[in-house]
Image: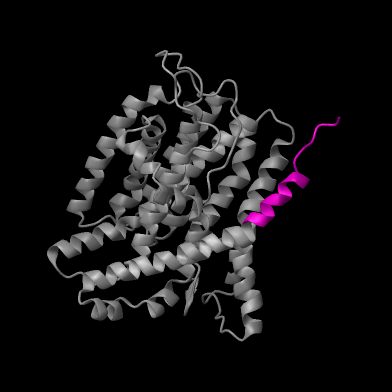
Amino acid sequence: MPESTPVCHQAPNSAAGTSAHSGATSPRVTGHLPALDGLRGLAILLVLLRHFTEGAELRSKSGRWLAAALDAGWIGVDLFFVLSGFLITGILLEARRSQHYFRNFYVRRTLRIFPLYYGVLAVIFGIAPWLGWLVPEVGPEEHSQAWLWAYGTNIIMSWTGSPLLKHGWLNLNHFWSLAVEEHFYLLWPLIVFTSTRLRLATITAAAFLGAFLLRVCLSYTHNALAPYILTPCRIDTLMLGALLAVAVREPGGVNALVRPARVVLATGVVILSGVFVLRKGLVFWDRYVLSGGFSLLAVSFGALLVLTLAAREHSLLARTFASAPLRFLGRYSYGIYVFHYLLLAWFDRIFPTSLLASYLGSYAFGLTAHVLLCSAVAVAIAFASWHLYEKQFLKLKRFFEYRAPR
């Protein structure tokens, strides 16, 4: 889930100490990691570019290639999944021997995620009708609204093979990824708690392979939506992050993964670039992307995560993901993700690209202005939502956290 980097406490045996293999100091992998905010900022930036340029009329040859590149911004969700798998598994591993392991985890996740998610649904389906706003039925299926409240958006969409949750100004189809994350949060703490690190690594590898094989099978059906959004089909990205969370806590830490990560990232970029050129884009319903492409994206983003953690302070990679703009976007990415697509129809009306293009004298300038204005409003709403609403719920954590008797 796109949200701010969770904070966890450093354990004595974490990879934050000295590498047993090289004797060099291994980068810290616990606590708040600013560079991962930057990675999350990149993820939400890719998603914004994808959605705010959808349907752009770029007719020149270079323009068509640019449109195809922007359309591939859906891969930002895959980066979110890898980061979530890494961070959540790390938190659970560090807290495994703590008091009230399950209660503390679920309380923190609930207070961080539910207020915005259910607050949005309450406004749309509970408050908006009383204000006289038109709130249409959500899709043609009976009781489809219930799937939203139960974090089953991806299930009902997969079952029907169509994006049901878009009607008029209302667009909640992007909630499918929040459902995937919530399913992960529900089951993963128990698996981590009952598994050794070796068993956990085995489980993650098996789940990664299983997701790949399931997508391959489903890619031969007429339902291209299910392998893209169904939880068992997308678990490989989360599992790749989880596997890395285990690996960086082994002897050698992050440093031991740097060399293979460079090879994996370079290989992944070359192969994915080849697919992009040969298939004239990187679209999720393409059979090649839908099957092996997703897994390749997962390992490539995992390699990028490792290299970001290991990057020297003044290197280009470290400076890029430690930059203030990306970190800012990363900190508010959850709210940005929730609001930007929900308000997409409104943005198209308020900031129409064609009108902006006529004012600025160029379609390219008009499209750029459209993206900047839409992004600015989405960020502003997410910023206000966090400081005025969401953040207040986190203050309740102290009422649930365990306190040792004096």
- Which residue appears at 64% of the width and 70% of the height? 122
Quarter of the image holding residue 193? top right
| Number of marks | 0
The image quadrant where one finds the C terminus is: top right
- The colour scheme of the drawn protein is one colour
Q: Is residue 357 magenta?
A: no
In the visual, does 213 lie left or right of 121?
left
Q: Is residue 401 magenta?
A: yes
Relative vertical location of residue 401 with respect to residue 48 in this rendering, above or below: above
The percent coordinates of residue 22 (x first, y second) are 39, 14
In the visual, does 138 lie left or right of 264?
right
Q: Residue furthest bottom?
A: 132
Relative vertical location of residue 96 with respect to residue 148 in this rendering, above or below: above
The percent coordinates of residue 347 (x first, y second) are 41, 74
The residue lying toward the viewer, choosing from 222 and 119, is 119
Q: Which residues are magenta?
A: 391-406
